[in-house]
Amino acid sequence: MKITVLTLFKEMYDGFLNSSIIKRIIDKQLVEINIVDIRDYSNDKHRHVDDTPYGGGAGMLMKVDVVHRALLDNKSDSSHILLTSPKAKPLVQKDLERLSKLDDIVIVCGHYEGIDYRIEKYCDEKVSIGDYVLTGGELASMVLIDGILRLLDEGISSASLLEESYNNGLLEYAQYTRPYEYEGDIVPEVLANGNHKEIKRFNLKSSLKETLTYRPDLLENRELSEIEKELLLELQKEKENGN
Ligand SMILES: C[S@@+](CC[C@H](N)C(=O)[O-])C[C@H]1O[C@@H](n2cnc3c(N)ncnc32)[C@H](O)[C@@H]1O
């Protein structure tokens, strides 16, 4: 896979691409990442990339011709071009799964007040990382790269990916490691008893509890299995009893 990022702030990627799992995936050559400076495509002797908006309004807009030149010089016919923008449906895990199957992705990062609207017609998809506004698309592109790359990583077992939050439509269950007891707080006994059937049931119940607490909307349209119905009833009774 190849990922190209068009940005005005290349230096923001130094630490990100040279740390932890992301560095390992790049070193393993599972992906080639190119960070391109949009400013190199300015025709202006002062390397300007932005201008004031027509019709007035606050701030500066990145110029469509400069960004388009950068795009043309760095895309291929098979590139899937993502435009970072707060004006899109927020990214979800399923999007990352879909994007992780592509061979060639180009991510365009806006900055300042954004990019001239006409850039949209040269892009295949707009991606928002949430309903809030950031100063630039760089963090959004890093979120995309991080989320995509960990799906390519052979170092992360597929079992661990399967059990993660959102993968089966639920949040992940509560997890524990040593020490067994910390400040009086003890790891649930069932997790230490080695009975896999009980552990599976316990984890599913914990997953349902987390989802019910933090993202009840995920349960609204879910077709509940018999065991999920049973566990949700148990949780409801426990709540009524104040547990
Ligand atoms: C300050 S924002 C522009 C906001 C724009 N004026 C608006 O109100 O919709 C500058 C750039 O940051 C990036 N950006 C900001 N928030 C984002 C988000 N939630 N998701 C993805 N990209 C975002 C985009 O690339 C955007 O062009």
Image (cartoon, helix red, strand yellow):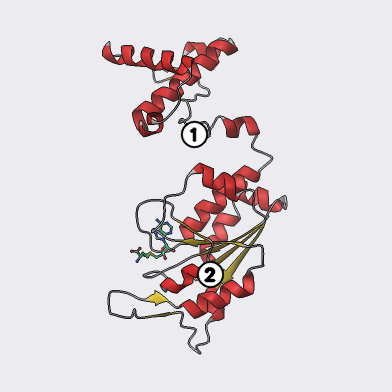
Residue at left offset 55%, top offset 29%? 163
Q: Nearer the viewer, residue 120 or 232?
A: 120
> Does 119 sit above or below residue 209?
below
The residue sitting at the right extreme is 29
Disc 1 designates what residue? 165
Q: Position of residue 47 (x, y in %)?
A: 49, 84
Residue 20 visible, this angle: no
Is 229 left, or right, of 38 in this rendering?
left
- Quarter of the image for the N terminus: give it: bottom right
Question: Which of label 1 and label 2 is nearer to you?
Answer: 2
* Residue 215, position as x, y percentages in the image: 37, 33
**Residue 11 visible, this angle:** yes
Q: Is residue 22 left or right of residue 42?
A: right
> What amino acid type should be assigned to the residue bearing mark 2?
Tyr
Report the front residue among 227 and 160: 227
Residue at x 66% of width, y 48% of height: 24
Q: Residues within 10 Å of mark 2 (few under 14, many from 20)?
A: some
Category of crowding for the residue at label 1, using alpha-carbon neighbours closer than 10 angstroms: few (below 14), some (14–19), many (at least 20): some
Residue 148 location, x and y as percent?
A: 58, 48
Determine which residue is flagged by label 2: 122
Callout 2 secondary element: helix
**Quarter of the rendered image showing ligand 1:** bottom left
Describe residue 184's horizontal placement relative to residue 25 as left or right: left
Q: What's under tag 1, amino acid-wise? A: Ser
Whole-angstrom CA distance, mark 1 to mark 2, is: 34 Å
As drawn, the residue found furthest toward the bottom would be 45
Q: Is residue 21 above or below residue 52?
A: above
